[in-house]
Image (cartoon, rainbow, N blue to C red):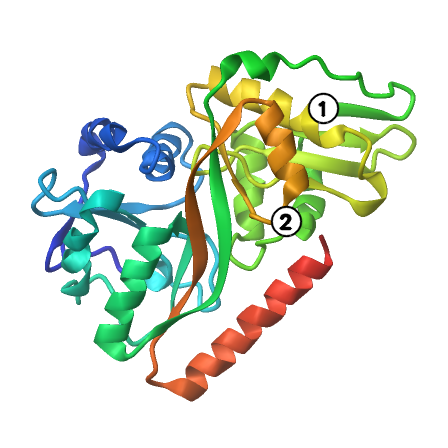
Amino acid sequence: MEIVPEGNNFVIVKECELPAMMEELEKYFPHSLKFHQTIKTYLNDRVWRFQFYRAKTWPQDPVCLHFPGCTYTPDNRTNESVGIFCPPDKLERMELIKDEDVLFEWHSPLYMNFTHVGIMFKMEEIFREKVNGRLEGHIYGDIYVHECPDELNLVLEPLAANEVIMKPLCIDDVKDIHDLYPAGDIESLELFEKLVIQLPGFGVFNQSDNELAAWSLQSYYGGMFSMQTKPKFRRKGYGIQLAQSLTKLVIRRGYIPFVVIRPENDASRGLYTKLGFRKAFESVRGTFVPLVGENHLQNNLTAYKQRQISNEENC
């Protein structure tokens, strides 16, 4: 998308205005945490190219957007995905989005990463009214935020020094990381290259051949990407070692650690709860699909779902 300075109800935020926008968003923690820290990481590290927008009636209407919302989509267009924040008790103000025909292409699919359930279902109402659209392929994820610092000092069994070693990730590890990542269909390989270079991440490596066994990495939204362990290295305690080390480092860098945990993932929930993370709210990711142009949309969605299946099989 060509950079558009303003739409019907939203205006682009100048870089010098972003710190003030972050201060306003702090009033809505934890719900605004992901959007807030996306701005913070953008200002600090320039990991990805984002355009941030706020309602023209900001801060009375605390609704804001950023394009792109995911770093990879089937057609790889900037406005093909979006990040949205609106306080859960002010969802009626998302009417501003319904009337936003400049920044949104309502007749094309729209991809959204994990976002508060209230926002997502309000967007589904908007899509249904605008283009008889629907939310497809939705996946639920609970947002857990680190709230109990004392629990982070949990004493852990040391790694077996003659078997594995934990060390910072490097550019040579990116292919393995992206192959393991379960949402590789919405986050590009290029993103992981930039993250490994500019943001902290740790890997557990097999001592004998330097094979990457498990990894955890800070994201462009300030929290942690889902930690992954190759199947043959699971149940060895590598996950909690990585999560503890990265959480401490993320805090030292001035961020509030948070992570998305699938509701059925008891192992991850138990691990992060031990380290002081607590459930803050429920979120959903998925694709909003208009009814029009069904053949073109079906081709895009078929390719998208095939990538999802492929990524899940690699995990």
The answer to which image quadrant residue 126 occupies is bottom left
Residue 211 lies, in percent from the top left, at: 83, 38
Residue 40 left/right relative to 73: left
Name which residue lies at 70% across and 24% down.
241
Up/down of 62 relative to 18, above or below = below
Q: Which of these two is toward me, 12 or 269?
A: 269
Residue 181: image tag? 2
Residue 5 seen from this side:
no
Residue 112 quadrant: bottom left
Query: Which mark is on residue 52?
Result: none
**Mark 1–mark 2 distance (CA, rounded to whole Å):** 19 Å
Please provide percent x and percent y for residue 224.
53, 35
Q: Is residue 279 left or right of residue 24?
A: right
Q: Quadrant of the N terminus?
A: bottom left
Whether label 1 touches label 2, CB < 8 Å:
no
Q: Is residue 230 left or right of residue 285?
A: right
**Which residue is pictured at 11% across the width and 38% down the height?**
59
Element type at mark 2: loop
The spot of residue 289 in percent (x, y) is: 38, 73
> Considering the numbered disc 1 on the image, is that residue within a helix, a strand or a loop?
strand
What residue is at 92 percent from the left and 21 percent from the top?
162
Residue under the point 19% across and 41% down: 13
Name which residue type carries label 2: Tyr
Q: Residue 168: x, y in percent? A: 67, 26
Amino acid of disc 1: Lys
10 Å neighbourhood of mark 1: few (<14), some, or many (≥20)?
Answer: few
Q: Which residue is mark 1?
A: 167
Q: Is residue 43 visible?
A: yes
Closer to the N terminus: mark 1 or mark 2?
1
Above or below, 56 against 298 in this view is above
Badge nearest the viewer, 1 or 2: 2
Give the vertical position of 83 relative to 159 (above or below): below
